[in-house]
Amino acid sequence: MNRKTIKTRTGAYHVTLPIRLVEEFDELLSFKSSRSKMIANLMKNYLEGDQRHIGSMTKKEIVISLMNQIDSNSTEFMMLALLKEAFTYDDGPSSS
């Protein structure tokens, strides 16, 4: 069975990074994850304007960001909506 594969042109690049930073990054990757793919995804997100660091977001903003990425009819969306309401309640009813 022949499968048509779509290849994206890639290139090898040399960058200088702190060793500990790479070690911490590698600790977050699963065994079969590709460091190159993860870095490419981070660069793509940066270029698309998704530059806000999750550490600067509130819990509610993180949940809203996740809600924007999934189908609004899914179970996950409903669970996130409940979580969002819980964070709204924690912040006070007027901050929705």
Image (cartoon, rainbow, N blue to C red):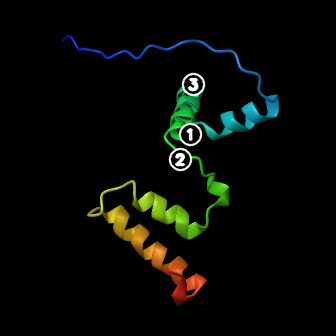
Number of the label disc, if any, that sits on residue 36: 3
Q: In this view of the protein, which residue sits in the foreground, 4 or 28?
A: 4
Amino acid type at mark 1: Tyr
The residue that label 1 is drawn on is 46
Residue 1: image quadrant is top left
Q: Is residue 8 left or right of residue 54?
A: left
Per the model, the C-alpha gap separating discs 2 and 3 is 19 Å
In the depicted structure, whether residue 13 falls above or below residue 92? above
Tell me if residue 33 can be seen: no
Query: At 54% from the left edge and 62% from the top edge, which residue is drawn?
Result: 62
Label 2 sits on what residue type?
Asp
| Label 1 secondary element | helix
Measure the alpha-carbon separation of dots 2 and 1: 5 Å
The mark closer to the camera, 1 or 3, is: 1
Estimate how packed mark 2 is, as few (under 14), some (14 to 19) or many (20 or more) residues with alpha carbons within 10 Å.
Answer: few
Q: What x and y, as percent, mark residue 55?
A: 67, 57
Image coordinates for residue 82, horizontal then vertical, percent: 42, 76
Secondary structure at numbered mark 3: helix
Residue 18 visible in the snapshot = yes
Q: Quadrant of residue 91?
A: bottom right
Please provide percent x and percent y for residue 78: 35, 69
Q: Which residue lies at the image location 73% right of the left edge and 38% below the top edge?
A: 24
Q: How many marks?
A: 3
> SS for tag 2?
loop
> Residue visible at 46% across and 65% down?
64
**52 or 85: which is nearer to us?**
52
Q: Is residue 24 left or right of residue 93?
A: right
The residue identified by callout 2 is 50
